[in-house]
Image (spheres, coloured by chain):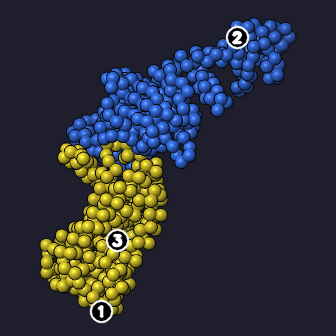
Chain colours: A blue, B yellow
Amino acid sequence: MNNDVAIQVANLSKYYGQLLAVDHISFTVRRGEFFGFLGPNGAGKTTTLRMLTGVIRADEGSASILEYKAGSLKAKQVTGVVPEMANAYADLSGWDNLMLMAGLYGILAGVARERGTSLMRETGLYPRKDSLVKTYSKGMKQRLILCLALVSDPEVLFLDEPTSGLDVQSARLIKDMLQRLNANGKTIFLTTHDMEEANQLCDRVAIINEGKIVAIDAPEKLRMAVSGMHSIEVSFDNVVSPEVLANFSGVNTVKKLGDKWRLYTGNPGELVVSLINYSSSNGPKIISLNTLSPSLEDAFMALTEKKGKDA
Amino acid sequence: MPDIATVLQQARRSLAIARKDIRIYYSKGPVIIFGVLFPVFLFLSFTIGRHLSADFMIPGLLGMILFFTATSVSPIVIPWEAQARTLERLMSCPVKIETIIVGDILASFAFGLAISLVPILIGLFLGITILSPFVFALAVILAALCFACLGTVFSIPPTNMPSTVNMIAAVVKFPVVFISGIFIPLDELPAWGQAIAYISPLTYFTDIARYSIQGQGHLPAALDLLVLLAFTAIFLVVATKLHQRTMPKRI
């Protein structure tokens, strides 16, 4: 196996009864890469992550973490996991949770104390380290769960929706910490349905839909690959009906976003001229007008909807 | 076949899991109710007013308390952890499912052993004499381990409701208490009653406890120990094999 490869997945599949939840997926994650795994709810993200972390067994195919078979003790030893919706032990203190996790990874007590102190300071939990976890807020619990995943100083980190439902400060703290970890050489596998998060953090993303991988590439390349998804965001000083906007040449879709309209088009230059002409010839006055490139969300929607229609 | 280093590594991690269980689950309501209060009240309701000797009462009381306490922790830990969403984290750690099960068994074993000291001390206070202390100690340790292993068998069905597991356990535990020579000695049971009694591991502990305290049992002491050992091995193998199948279904 290539030493540059951190995660290797080949034809991995999982059935739940008759349902093929993960359908023969294959991909590779390089060492030190920040890899995003995107998909709508029920697409197979969590099932894939659970197979890679050894919580459930694959029905077909194979996967390896570094050079070890996924799910083996050696693979688990080099892996840190932040599972979706996981909790720390509510009846133990944050510190005791950390020391328990260190014990389960066979970390020496002195090293565990040093790392535990450093992690709790970095996440702002140190002043509450001896409080029971049941007294922590949701953001504090999630920061603790990240500490639990890091106490063994893993080479590969798996995170399943780590910032889902968190307050802005906790989400920012976790994202900043993940960026620092990645900069220090950790391989990170992140499942999320937050496009902005994936766009900010990931070197490459895979998009999974209905158990199949529909695209793998850098976020920027995925955005650029979506043709016809340029858009213009425009607001007027008076009411304009969507039918009027839809009648402009080259407009594919019209969406109302608060007091603004977003018009999707394959030819943004021509549409800008048409809008200005419309406004200057007795139409409502334009308050603001912005041209937008396709976002990762647009790429995601295009790729997942296309597959849905094809199916 | 795992090497010695892996076995020792996993044994240390089982101890870490047992320590966690002791800190979290010993004080849980179902453990206190089903593990301590219930056997005491059940025993009192059957013995008060019957003018039984301490020599007869104490082995039965000890057997029942040991049976209930050692089977009170191990069945609830896994469903409780699945419900509290701590199980997936545990399963993603570098520990085998056997390691998790053995950790839970050790916590239940220690609970049974610690609480069983109470009826033993009561017995000594009432003037009983332990005629074979070594055999007695061996039997208490082996029975606590056997019953703790049985506890993990109760939690094999992949339900995440501790109350459902307790119901399954109660359906098995109550009949077992009545067929194990606690309230009626084996010698006084009819042949069919004795045949049923032999399928209960508690029978063999009660018998060896009577041998250790009263000086005579229904079966040879060595046979009692051997059968307890066999039950322990069977429960352990069944629990670890079947939990490997059902534990991922809890996630």
Q: Nearer the viewer, mark 3 or mark 1?
A: 3
B243 or A251, which lies in front? B243
Three-letter amino acid code at the position of disc 1:
His
Q: Position of residue A206 (x, y in %)?
A: 50, 26
Q: Residue at x 48, y 43 (%)?
A: A85
Residues tagged 2 and 1 counted as in contact (Cβ below 8 A): no
Q: Do discs 3 and 1 belong to a common subunit? A: yes
The reply to whether the C-beta atoms of the residues labelled 3 and 1 are less than 8 Å apart is no
Q: Secondary structure at mark 1?
A: loop
The three-letter code of the residue at mark 3 reads: Phe
Earlier residue among tags 3 and 1: 1
Quarter of the image with the N terminus of chain A in it:
top left
Would you place residue A299 above or below residue B94 in this image? above
Q: Position of residue A295 (x, y in %)?
A: 59, 20
Q: Which residue is mark 1?
A: B51
Residue drawn at 82 percent across, 22 percent down: A243
Q: Residues within 10 Å of mark 1 (few under 14, many from 20)?
A: few
At which x and y percent is residue A101? Answer: 32, 43
Label 3 crowding class (10 Å Cα cut-off): few <14, some 14-19, many 20+?
Answer: many
Quick check: do tags 2 and 1 share a chain?
no
| Chain bearing mark 2 | A
Looking at the rendered structure, the kind of residue marked 2 is Asn
Instruction: Work out whether A198 lies above or below A211.
Output: above
Q: CA distance from mark 3 to mark 2?
A: 77 Å
Element type at marker 2? loop
Q: Which residue is mark 3?
A: B68
Q: Give the residue displayed 27% in from the left and 44% down from the top.
A: A103
Residue A4 visible from this viewpoint:
yes
